[in-house]
Amino acid sequence: MAQYNQKLRYPIGIFQLPHADAGEQTQQWIEEIAAFPGLLRKEVQGLSDEQLAWPYRPDGWNIRQVVHHCADSHMNCFSRFKLALTEDNPTIRPYFEDRWAQLPDT
């Protein structure tokens, strides 16, 4: 049962730190990030409101919330990187993802 819950919690697996020499890997990640919005759009296109409200795991977010979380997370990450590149001592501020998922735009 614990293994089942792990798969639900981490559907693409637990993060593993890449090797120090990640040149080719970095390019692959850039390409995956660039393709992600189109692939995600394709996955949810045509889903009804009822389907978008379906939780993807027990007690988890619904599909609509997961899609919005992807956008929220990527926007926050982008801003954090820009702050880190432009400030001497940037404060990387966390955000309450669970609260964001409850906002009306989700």
Image (cartoon, grey):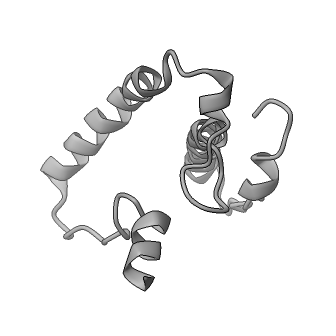
Asked whether 70 or 22 is in front, the reply is 70
User: What residue sits 82% from the left and 54% below the top?
Assistant: 99
Measured along the vertical axis of the image, is residue 28 above or below residue 59? above
x and y, in percent, of residue 56 in the image: 54, 50
Please identify the quarter of the rendering in which residue 49 is found. top right
Please identify the quarter of the rendering in which residue 47 is found. top right
User: What residue sits 72% from the left and 55% below the top?
Assistant: 97
User: What residue sits 55% from the left and 57% below the top?
Assistant: 57
Measured along the vertical axis of the image, is residue 59 above or below residue 99? below
Q: Quadrant of the C terminus?
A: top right
x and y, in percent, of residue 79 in the image: 63, 42
Please identify the quarter of the rendering in which residue 2 is found. bottom left
Q: Is residue 81 left or right of residue 101?
A: left
Asked whether 88 or 29 is in front, the reply is 29
Q: Quadrant of the N terminus?
A: bottom left
x and y, in percent, of residue 87 in the image: 66, 52
x and y, in percent, of residue 25 in the image: 18, 51
Measured along the vertical axis of the image, is residue 31 above or below residue 83? above
Measured along the vertical axis of the image, is residue 34 above or below residue 101? above
Q: Is residue 46 left or right of residue 69?
A: left
